[in-house]
Image (tube, rainbow, N blue to C red):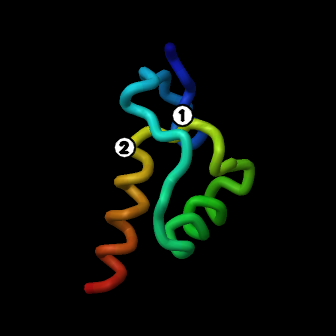
């Protein structure tokens, strides 16, 4: 089954997507700041989630 990532709009396979992110509130806040339409229960690709995790790591330096 294919899904559209709600952040980057790329088409992704179900097995490389995540239905919701179990992460810090800060990560979710960053995504929502850039993408207010983002819903936790919808599909988001790992590449987009990793991008926001990287932003957090870089901010900690």
Query: Can you give x and y, in whole percent of width and height, for residue 1 in the image?
Result: 50, 14
Residue sitting farthest toward the bottom:
61
Q: In the image, is residue 19 above or below residue 36?
A: above
Q: Residues within 10 Å of mark 2 (few under 14, many from 20)?
A: some
Q: Residue at x 42, y 61 (%)?
A: 52
Q: Secondary structure at mark 2?
A: helix
28 on left or right of 61: right
Residue sitting farthest toward the left:
61
Q: Which residue is mark 1?
A: 5
Query: Can you give x and y, in whole percent of width and height, for residue 28 in the image?
Result: 57, 64
Residue 12: quadrant of the picture: top left
Q: Which residue is mark 2?
A: 47
Point out the tag, 1 or 2, that comes first from the N-terminus: 1
Query: How far apart are the alpha carbons under marks 1 and 2?
Result: 10 Å
Q: Residue at x 36, y 80 (%)?
A: 59
Q: In the image, is residue 22 above or below residue 8?
A: below
Q: Which mark is residue 19?
A: none
Query: Can you give x and y, in whole percent of width and height, for residue 30 in the image?
Result: 56, 67
Give the camera-side residue of 43 and 32.
43
Q: Secondary structure at mark 1?
A: loop
Residue 45: quadrant of the picture: top left
Query: Can you give x and y, in whole percent of width and height, for residue 10 in the image?
Result: 49, 28
Q: Residue at x 72, y 56 (%)?
A: 36
Residue 55: quadrant of the picture: bottom left
Q: In the image, is residue 27 above or below residue 21?
A: below
Asked if the residue under mark 2 is in contact with the one under mark 1, i.e. CB atoms within 8 Å, the reply is: yes
Q: Residues within 10 Å of mark 1 (few under 14, many from 20)?
A: many
Q: Residue at x 26, y 85 (%)?
A: 61
């Amino acid at each position: 089954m294919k899904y559209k990532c709600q952040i980057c709009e790329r088409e992704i396979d179900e097995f490389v997507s995540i239905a919701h992110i179990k992460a810090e509130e800060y990560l979710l806040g960053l995504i929502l700041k850039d993408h207010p339409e983002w819903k936790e229960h919808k599909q988001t690709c790992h590449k987009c989630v990793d991008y926001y995790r990287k932003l957090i790591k870089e901010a900690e330096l």
